[in-house]
Image (spheres, rainbow, N blue to C red):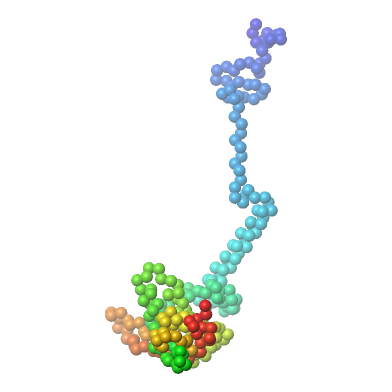
Amino acid sequence: MDAYDGGANARHGPDRPAEPGVPAVSGGSAVFGGSAEPDPPAAPRAGIAALSLHYQIGVALALAVVAVGVCVHLGMTFLHVAPPNTVTREHGKAVDDWIYPEFEQNWKLFAPNPLQQNISIQVRAEVRDGEGGTLTTGWYDLSAEDGRAIDGNLLPSHTQQNELRRAWDFFLATHDGENRPVGLRGSLSESYLRRIVVLRLDRDDAVRATTGGGGAIERVQVRSRTSNVPPPEWSREKVSTTPAYRELPWWPVPADEAGGGVR
């Protein structure tokens, strides 16, 4: 009896065994190699895509705020260091309010201006000794001290390189030629410079070197020594190398600073 004969044991077409090279068919599904392979599981979501919709919206808003803030800061910094233009003339105060004092830039875009002078900041002090007398110290060259600390130092500190220089620049920018403060920042620059020099005098042990014992600083006087950088030997330029001095008035030192600055 073959597969096409009738009867209860007759084989039906769909259930007949597969011929060589032909997949077996059972229940309408093709089976290759004797078993069916399930679909691979979907890869889990990672990053922002793994968050719920509400968190995705929150992250997107936070990133947008950060991007706007970065763009505004870069724009303000560019306007601050750029040459004067229509925008800075119209909105210069807004730019300065954004930059100062946290983001101050000590350079100008497209306008390099290398220093052509050597400027040294020096200080001396009036010291009250233990017997009530007053003595005056010699001049301490603080810039030379910073120079010696930087020379040969592969990693000089920001304080050694810039603190004194920037304090002097700050003072000059807020005072006129008669050393009178201009604007509200004048008294601030005086206090800042005074505290720096008093701390330096304390570090140099100026009181003990002057009195031979204890004492306190009563007043300090700051001066600058400016000399032109000599031109190279091949240049025909002639400049004077005679130093010029600018002496500031004596500043009284408050009692809380007299022992070596505010702690």
Q: Please, which residue is most extreme toward the bottom here?
A: 133
Is 26 left, or right, of 203 in this rendering? Answer: right
110 or 201, which lies in front? 201
> On the image, which quarter does residue 100 sit in?
bottom right
Depth check: give the residue in front, 30 or 118: 118
Q: Give the residue drawn at x 64%, y 56%.
A: 59
Residue at image x 41%, y 88%? 211
Q: Is residue 84 left or right of residue 44?
A: left
The picture places residue 41, in percent across and down from the top left corner, at 61, 37
Q: Position of residue 192 (x, y in %)?
A: 51, 81
Q: Is residue 227 left or right of residue 128?
A: left
Q: In the rendered image of this protein, does residue 214 appear above or below residue 146? A: below
Residue 202 occupies which quadrant of the picture? bottom left
- The answer to which quarter of the image holds residue 45 is top right
Q: Is residue 4 above or below residue 32?
A: above
Which residue is situated farthest in the front direction here?
131
Q: How many circles with numbers are drawn on the protein?
A: 0
> Which residue is most to the left?
234
Q: Is residue 133 visible?
A: yes
Residue 61 is situated, as x and y percent measured from the top left of the image, at 65, 59
Q: Residue at x 66, y 12 (%)?
A: 11
Dividing the image into 4 quarters, which one contains the N terminus?
top right
* Location of residue 111 with respect to 130 vertically, above or below: above
Which residue is located at x 39 percent, y 83 percent?
141
Q: For residue 112, say whether it is visible.
A: no
Please state which of residues 60 and 217 is positioned toward the viewer in this rendering.
217
